[in-house]
Image (cartoon, rainbow, N blue to C red):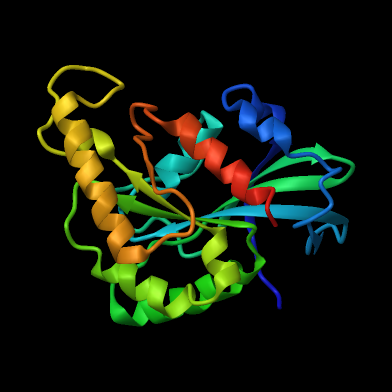
Amino acid sequence: MGITKYRLHRGDISELRTKYPAFGKLNAANGMGWHKWVDKTTKEGSYDKMILFVGKSGYGKSTTVNALFGKKLLETSEVAACTRVCQCLEFHVGNNHWLSLGDLPGVGENIERDNEYLKLYSEFFDYASVIVHVLRADTRDYSIDEHMTAKLIHTPRMKEKVIYALGQCDKIEPLNRKISPTPSSDQLKNISLKLREVMDKFLPKNPVVPYSAETGWNMSFLSDEIVRVALLE
């Protein structure tokens, strides 16, 4: 299997660890889940562990990756797809081992492009150590996400790699007009209802993570879960 990553950044794991300490648990001594990787340009070999972000176009995948990194490197848009390739940020863990945050193009634009993307998704799903399936808290229609799950996530091993991340919780009703990183008590009640809905629809093996990349709410919980699942492989 050959996959192509388009690298937008190469740095050190400390760039993630400073804001989200859980990433400090990843180190080259963890011998499992690292894939041999050869750079097509330099021909240099290394070991890679990928955290893959997927979901419907406009759901906030790129915004989530940017929030974890702390810089807006990935292009974002709520109304249009920004990329048709896997954009990637890489962080040196040690001893020629690298953690990758991979952002795949969003599905749900049109049938022809979705068929193209599902093939791309399938190749990366096998490779990734963690798959973060980003959902929106402020929507009722998960039909495209359910279709993608049915097509791609159908083995016990694959299900164990998936984290359903319920993003944009700051936009769930009733909207909080005050500037606050934490949802209101009424929003938290609706978030709890939405979590139950997601669990019933997708039957996840891992906890569903509610969060907001815009306000930073629960991003630490998301990073904790990403690292926990990454260490299982």
| Residue 4 vertical position relative to residue 215 in the rendered view, above or below | below
Q: Position of residue 178 (x, y in %)?
A: 16, 17
Specify the quadrant of the image occupied by residue 187.
Answer: top left
Seen at 71% across and 53% down, the residue is 49
Relative to residue 197, is residue 68 drawn left or right? right
Task: Give the quadrant of the N terminus.
Answer: bottom right
The residue lying toward the viewer, choosing from 18 and 229, is 229
Seen at 40% across and 71% down, the residue is 149
Relative to residue 125, is residue 81 drawn left or right? left
Relative to residue 125, is residue 106 drawn left or right? left
Q: Position of residue 86 (x, y in %)?
A: 55, 60
The answer to whether any part of residue 80 appears in the image is no
The mark tally for this picture is 0
Seen at 49% across and 42% down, the residue is 65
| Residue 85 vertical position relative to residue 27 in the rendered view, above or below | below
Q: Position of residue 101 (x, y in %)?
A: 59, 48
Task: Give the quadrant of the C terminus.
Answer: bottom right
Seen at 79% across and 55% down, the residue is 32
Specify the quadrant of the image occupied by residue 219.
Answer: top left
